[in-house]
Image (cartoon, grey):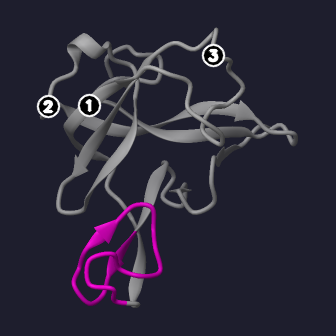
Amino acid sequence: MTRQVAIAEGLLSWASGEARLIGSRCETCGVVVFPSQRGCPACTGEETEVIELGTRGTLWTFTTQGFLPKWPYAGPGTDEAFEPYAVGYVELPGQVRVEARLVEVEVDDLHIGMDMELCVVPFITDDGGDEVVVPAFRPSGASVDGASA
């Protein structure tokens, strides 16, 4: 049976039954970061708590990725076959802004403040047959195949 695994250790959790981003919160100043870190980038505190982040937020800003990303983010594609895609920052209320690929929406339909929800998208299949996935965001209410939920 194929299972989904995150592209990097410590990015995603399925403990609650759905994919969730793993961040951390500083126990000294309360700053939340993604991905999780042992130290706080705001106050340099060393006491942090690993937390699951929210799955819904709003689009803070976006752009188009117009060139093939470099390793380890490039995947199996080539420069010749590359197709541009949308990336943006999604603000998770009371937590953090997360940079991710934006899927299931045309760039012309994106707008700042748009309601977004976390999803995962296939990246590659590893040597063990597991589907390696990356976190992404799509407009709230979209289903995996792009139809409205």
Query: Count the marks: how many?
Result: 3
Distance CA(mark 1)–CA(mark 3) = 22 Å
x and y, in percent, of residue 80 in the image: 64, 9
Task: Give the amino acid type for the residue marked by disc 3 in the picture.
Answer: Asp
In contact (CB < 8 Å): disc 1 and disc 3? no
Left or right, residue 3 beside residue 35: right
Q: Amino acid at mark 2?
A: Ile
Residue 37's spot in the image, x, y percent?
46, 73
| Whether residue 140 can be seen here | no
- Write down the quadrant of residue 111 in the picture: top left
Give the overall secondary structure of the magenta segment. loop
How many other residues sit within 10 Å of disc 3, few (<14), some (14-19) or many (≥20)? few
Q: Quadrant of residue 116?
A: top left
Q: Identify residue type, mark 1.
A: Phe
**Mark 2 — residue?**
112
- Point out the frontmost of discs 3 and 2: 3
Q: Is disc 2 in contact with disc 1, using a CB cutoff of under 8 Å?
A: yes
- For the point 32% across and 12% down, the residue is 106
Q: Disc 1 marks which residue? A: 62
First reached walking from the N terminus: tag 2 or tag 1: 1
Q: State which region is magenta.
A: 24-45
